[in-house]
Image: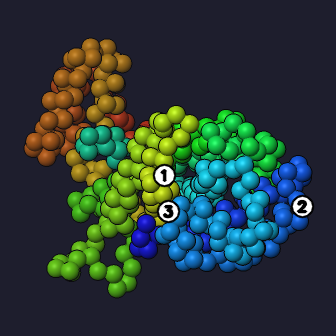
Amino acid sequence: MIPRYSRPDMVAIWAPETKFRIWFEIEAHACDAQADLGVIPRENAEAVWTADGVAFDVSRIDEIEAVTKHDVIAFLTHLAEIVGADEARFVHQGMTSSDVLDTTFNIQLTRAADILITDLEALLAALKRRALEHKDTVRIGRSHGIHAEPTTMGLTFARFYAEMDRNLQRMKIARQEIATGAISGAVGTFANIDPAVEAHVCDKLGLIPEPISTQVIPRDRHAAFFATLGVIASSVENLATEIRHMQRTEVLEAEEFFSAGQKGSSAMPHKRNPVLTENLTGLARLVRSMALPAMENVALWHERDISHSSVERNIGPDATVTLDFALARLTNVVEKLVVYPEHMMRNMNQYKGLVMSQRVLLALTQKGASREAAYAMVQRNAMKVWEEGRDFQTELAADPEVTAILSQDEIAEKFDLGYHTKHVDTIFARVFGED
């Protein structure tokens, strides 16, 4: 997590000040519940809240931890310094460190998910706007990087919209699954703390109680969360890769916005490089790489160990901060993407009608030719276009075997671009709804 690829709202979730504030709220709400149950005096629970609004001294907590070698104990010691040792003597009653750490981690992930959901919604709005703008902008579709058949730029944006919409639904599910808390004590049996305390704390903090925790919240939840981030990152790369291809000099169907004063190369003044989408490709690799250790965290020893802890201290902030930045950057790229319809048409016609080969093939079979014979007729004329730069329609019209089956008008009709875009509205209705 470095400032270059960070945005402040997401960074703030992972700041020590935020973490300690959540720790305090968990402990204070737990004290309230304990007082409601008559386990601790009401005045002690109220005394804990005198620290509400107090800025916890991070350096002081670090100083204490240097001696105790235990972060939760260091915090509790500092809290007692603020509210008074006698007043704080019931804090953490019947609890274990994981009650605080795991519940806090899930609160942070839930808050991070809220930001990522907002990010995805912004990206979807940009993709939809560009899709509608270029619904009928014809471009060549490619398979294996080779010209295939006509499509539209609007359909290109629409398919990425549909993919990101699926990611939005995945993110919402991941948020729901991670929004659990546990205040169940050592090995999760509630032996020293009433389950009502857990219910109260979770209610106050917007969580649901973990059905069964073994001192830690089960890590399959976290594995699913970070796997979702990895899938979203892969989709970011998918869109970034398409833009990078479109910006290649030989293609140049679209390019990243190039601002006044921007420089593309320290050596070559003419360069306009796809630096943002290349950056997004790299960031996607980072986010994906954090899904695997989250999955490896699922297998812990018995009721708990801390092999997951060091992993999560890294991937929690790094994955969410990086993906937040990537989604915001991608949204900006899509919004400002410069599209060149005339270049799309130039590329479409580069091989003089060759992309209509399937229409001719189907027409020949419909008029009685076997598929094998029809394929041979079309392919031999197509190869003249590839190898000699001929015009495909002209070659077909001069082929006696073809003209014995198809008239000149029937051949010409097979080169109508509108044939390939006749169902665009149907696809758009599927993706965006009837409106």
Q: Is residue 209 above or below residue 93?
A: above
Residue 59 rendering spot, x and y as whole percentages? 54, 78
Q: Identity of the amino acid at label 1?
A: Ser
Q: Identity of the amino acid at label 3?
A: Lys
Report the label total: 3
Visible in this render: residue 368?
Answer: yes
Residue 101 rendering spot, x and y as whole percentages? 60, 54
Local packing at callout 1 (Cα closer than 10 Å; few below 14, some 14-19, many 20+) is: few
Could you say which quadrant of the image residue 371 lies in? top left
Local packing at callout 2 (Cα closer than 10 Å; few below 14, some 14-19, many 20+) is: some
Q: Which residue is mark 1?
A: 309
Is 252 on the left-hand or right-hand side of 21? left
Sequence order check: which comes first, mark 2 or mark 3? 2
Q: Secondary structure at mark 3?
A: loop
Labels 3, 1: front one: 3
Residue at the image position 75 percent from the left and 63 percent from the top: 89
Q: Which residue is mark 3?
A: 69
Local packing at callout 3 (Cα closer than 10 Å; few below 14, some 14-19, many 20+) is: few
Sequence order check: which comes first, mark 2 or mark 1? 2
Res 346 label: none
Q: Which residue occupies the foreground of this view, 135 or 24?
A: 24
Visible in this render: residue 334?
Answer: no
Q: Which residue occupies the foreground of this view, 296 or 280?
A: 296
Residue lying furthest left: 388
Q: Which residue is mark 2?
A: 42
Could you say which quadrant of the image residue 104 lies in? bottom right
Residue 177 rendering spot, x and y as whole percentages? 63, 42
